[in-house]
């Protein structure tokens, strides 16, 4: 692993050459200089030919996404299951990624492991990428000697979590896009189209209809204060994001409010149940104690109301109550989920029953998002049609009454 220490800062070179068998070969190698690359190729028995510096992308990626962590986990699971040693697996994954930030992360973990640290301990040093649940599962795998099977469970869990996150984003982004399009079209009409009609109305010399006057006042106000209005909106968004990031109380309040939204709230309810079930199934099957598993599920639920309810369930279970009874007491989980967990507890197969619940609700989230998309497509046309049509009617009302004005 010594060669990896500076890997993130080395330059990539594309090379071509001829190996000992006389065949043409090519590849990519990292090094400081062209001379160093030639020397490394000769050490490998390759006669170097053309060597060029690999072009760097215009915008370097300096962020590791949850999807990349899920992909990294799946690669680790595959390699460990194939019998590849841990350090060699990390080395191969580091060499195969184009994301410099991710490569640095993997190299740092590999260096800790090579110096004698356990993998879970090394991962805990990077909490922004590997949360407590991830590290606890890896620790359980190391203690039980079944790291490859645990990594397969973690990979499945992370992949399902990323799929669910993408579906929720789709459910939230689409209504937001509808609102933004409607506001954008309305602002364009008020700023550029309505003023053209106003110049015509000034020559009429008669009182305009109330609806037309109302629209003209809005247009005039928007023209005079649009910088203040848009500036206030942008400042408000940044202020809200800052407060949302800093204030847990505000985040909890927002979490509770979004669950009450029509249509979208129902999707978020199902998503929270799916997260709870999938997390608890994964941790329980990995041998994590139930109390720790419930604590992890509370953190992974993605909503403050469900987090508090799961922590309450944890307290009641710790006092000797069955989990299905504790879930019924919080009055938040669907009856079907409670009954399935009750059956699982009686049959001694809670993890498999939770996996089924998670799969059911993940499918329901998927169907709900697709239905939402289908529902909003005609709604976009209706909303924009009402706004645009209303503005057009307000502008043509005085023209319709032009005959009365002339008389």
Image: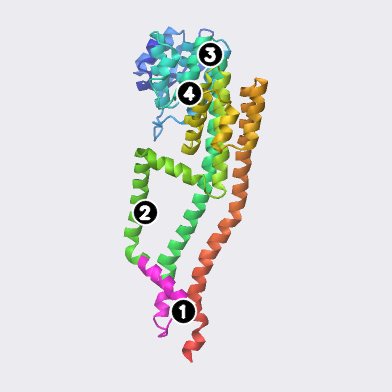
> Which residue matches tag 2?
233
Q: Crowding at label 3, few (<14), some or many (≥20) Cα neighbours within 10 Å? A: many
Secondary structure beneath disc 1? loop
- Residue 39 drawn in magenta: no
Mark 3 lies on residue: 147
Q: Are marks 4 and 3 in contact (CB under 8 Å)?
A: no
Mark toward the start of the polypeptide (3 vs 1): 3
Q: CA distance from mark 3 to mark 1?
A: 76 Å
- Callout 4–callout 1 Cβ contact below 8 Å: no
Instruction: Examine the structure image and report whether residue 198 is included in the region drawn in magenta.
Output: yes
Main SS, magenta residues: helix
Along the polypeptide, which appears first: circle 2 or circle 1? 1
Judged from the image, the secondary structure of the residue bearing numbered disc 2 is: helix
* Residue 38 visible within the image: no
Q: Name which of mark 4 and mark 1 comes first in the sequence.
A: 4
Residue at the bottom extreme of this rendering? 407
Using the image as rendered, state which of residue 60 and residue 353 is in the foreground: 353
Q: Residues within 10 Å of mark 2 (few under 14, many from 20)?
A: few
The span picked out in magenta is 195-221
Where is residue 380 drawn, in percent x and y? 56, 56
Q: Which residue is mark 4?
A: 133
């Amino acid at each position: 692993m010594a060669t990896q220490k500076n890997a993130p800062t080395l330059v990539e070179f594309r090379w071509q050459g001829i190996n000992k068998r006389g065949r043409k070969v090519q590849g990519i190698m990292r090094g400081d200089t062209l001379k160093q690359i030639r020397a490394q190729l000769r050490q490998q028995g390759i006669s170097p030919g053309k060597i060029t510096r690999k072009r760097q992308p215009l915008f370097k990626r300096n962020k590791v996404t949850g999807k990349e962590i899920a992909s990294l986990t799946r690669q680790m699971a595959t390699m460990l299951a194939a019998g590849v040693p841990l350090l060699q697996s990390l080395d191969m994954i580091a060499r195969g990624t184009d994301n410099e930030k991710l490569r640095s992360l993997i190299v740092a973990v590999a260096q800790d492991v090579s110096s004698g640290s356990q993998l879970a301990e090394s991962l805990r040093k990077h909490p922004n990428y590997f949360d407590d649940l991830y590290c606890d599962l890896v620790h359980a795998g190391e203690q039980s000697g079944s790291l490859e099977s645990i990594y397969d469970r973690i990979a499945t869990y992370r992949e399902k979590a990323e799929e669910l996150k993408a579906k929720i984003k789709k459910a939230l982004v689409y209504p937001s896009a509808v609102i933004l399009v409607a506001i954008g079209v309305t602002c364009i009409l008020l700023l550029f189209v309505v003023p053209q009609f106003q110049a015509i109305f000034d020559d009429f010399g008669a009182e305009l209809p109330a609806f037309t006057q109302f629209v003209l006042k809005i247009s005039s106000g928007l023209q005079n204060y649009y910088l203040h209005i848009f500036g206030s909106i942008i400042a408000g968004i940044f202020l809200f994001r800052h407060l949302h990031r800093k204030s847990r109380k505000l985040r909890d309040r927002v979490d509770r409010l979004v669950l009450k939204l029509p249509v979208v709230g129902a999707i978020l309810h199902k998503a929270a149940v799916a997260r709870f079930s999938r997390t608890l199934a994964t941790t329980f099957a990995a041998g994590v104690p139930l109390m720790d598993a419930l604590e992890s599920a509370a953190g992974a639920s993605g909503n403050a109301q469900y987090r508090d309810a799961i922590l309450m369930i944890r307290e009641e279970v710790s006092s000797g109550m069955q989990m299905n009874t504790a879930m019924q007491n919080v009055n938040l989980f669907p009856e079907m989920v409670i009954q399935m967990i009750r059956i699982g507890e009686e049959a001694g197969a809670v993890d498999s029953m939770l996996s089924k619940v998670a799969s059911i609700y993940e499918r329901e989230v998927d169907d709900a998002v697709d239905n939402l998309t289908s529902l909003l497509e005609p709604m976009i046309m209706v909303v924009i049609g009402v706004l645009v049509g209303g503005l057009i009617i307000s502008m043509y009302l005085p023209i319709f009454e032009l005959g009365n004005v002339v008389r």
